Amino acid sequence: MKAKEESEGMLKEFQAFAFRANVVDLAIAVALGAAFTAVVTAFVAGLLTPLIAAIFGKANFSGLNFTINHSEFQYGLVINAVITLLMVAAALFFFVVKPMMAIRRRNGQATTPPPPMAACPSCFTEVDLRARRCPACTEKLAAGWGQ
């Protein structure tokens, strides 16, 4: 009887965990992230990579390599990866981040401004005015130090 009560209690705990709002939100975010990855990958492969090929005359740099003492260094793979990273980052920035920021500004949900900063009197590192110790040089900062 006690084992059944323990298993029911454990099942209720698991249910409370699994249906907690942040777990469900995370699951939705992962699913949307996977779908969005497919869209961004198709955008980069279908539109941006041919654009690079049109400009530079070569769409795929993976064949670029050199050999030293029978060791092949495929620097073209690194170039491809860097170009892909930059194109994906640019696509995300211009087609997701910028429009979302514009929508938030239009709806009055602008991001919070950065905290006021001042130079540390000892090391001149920019420090939040609310700080009581410099994170760079660990100098103790008196109340009202930045005014």
Image (spheres, rainbow, N blue to C red):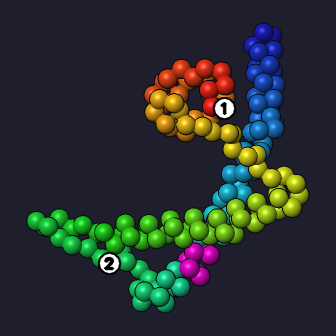
User: Where does the magenta region start and end?
Assistant: 42-48
Assign the magenta stretch its main secondary structure: helix
Query: How far across and how far down the image is residue 44, in percent?
Result: 57, 75
Query: How far across and how far down the image is residue 109, in percent?
Result: 84, 52
Is residue 45 within the magenta segment?
A: yes
Q: Which mark is residue 63?
A: 2
Q: Secondary structure at mark 1?
A: loop
On screen, residue 3 versus residue 132, left or right, reads: right
The residue tagged 1 is: 147
Query: How far across and how far down the image is residue 101, in percent?
Result: 76, 60
**N-term mark: 1 or 2:** 2
On screen, residue 11 versus residue 127, left or right, reads: right
Please name whichever residue, 83 or 1, is drawn nearer the observer in this view of the structure: 83
Instruction: Specify the farthest residue to the top.
Output: 2
Against 82, residue 135 (above or below) is above
Picture residue at 76% right of the left edge, 21% below the top: 10
Please name whichever residue, 88 or 16, is drawn nearer the observer in this view of the structure: 88
Q: Quadrant of the N terminus?
A: top right
Picture residue at 66% right of the left edge, 69% below the top: 94
Query: How far across and how far down the image is residue 100, in percent?
Result: 77, 61
Q: Secondary structure at mark 2?
A: loop
